[in-house]
């Protein structure tokens, strides 16, 4: 039997929401072992002078705990 844990992270990208998700998963994998999935809880953009400067996502990342 395995046990999983969920942690929330926020990541960003200057290119797109998709890249923000990829950046978040890439970074999570550096710290967390056995990442198995993620749920994008929300999306947000940072706007300066009428232009989108950054795409941000809040994600819940699931990882399986080691025995």
Image (cartoon, rainbow, N blue to C red):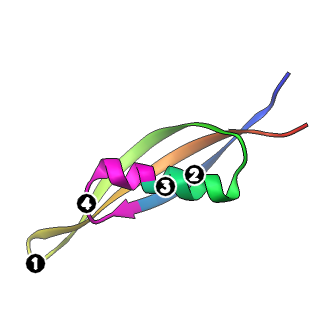
Q: Locate the C terminus and report the quarter of the image it occupies.
A: top right
Q: Sort mark 4 into few (<14), some (14-19) or many (20+) by Cα contacts within 10 Å.
A: few
Counting residues from the start of the chain, the first of labels 2 and 3 encountered is: 2
Q: Sort mark 3 into few (<14), some (14-19) or many (20+) by Cα contacts within 10 Å.
A: many
Residue 14 locus on image (x, y percent): 27, 66
Residue hosting label 3: 24
Look at the numbered discs 1 and 3 and tell me whether their residues touch, using CB distance below 8 Å.
Answer: no
Q: Sort mark 1 into few (<14), some (14-19) or many (20+) by Cα contacts within 10 Å.
A: few
The extreme right residue here reads 67
How far apart are the alpha carbons under marks 1 and 2? 30 Å
Q: Residue at x 70, y 52 (%)?
A: 32
Numbered disc in front, either 2 or 3:
3
Counting residues from the start of the chain, the first of labels 2 and 4 encountered is: 2
Q: Secondary structure at mark 2?
A: strand
Q: Secondary structure at mark 1?
A: loop
Highlighted range, magenta: 12-22
Residue hosting label 1: 49
> Where residue 8 is drawn, which disc sits there?
2
């Amino acid at each position: 039997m395995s046990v999983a844990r969920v942690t929330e992270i926020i990541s960003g990208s200057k290119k797109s929401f998709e890249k923000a998700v990829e950046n978040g998963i890439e970074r999570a994998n550096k710290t967390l072992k056995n990442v198995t999935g993620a749920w994008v809880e929300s999306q947000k953009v940072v706007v300066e002078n009428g232009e989108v400067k950054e795409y941000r996502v809040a994600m819940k990342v699931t990882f399986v705990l080691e025995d």
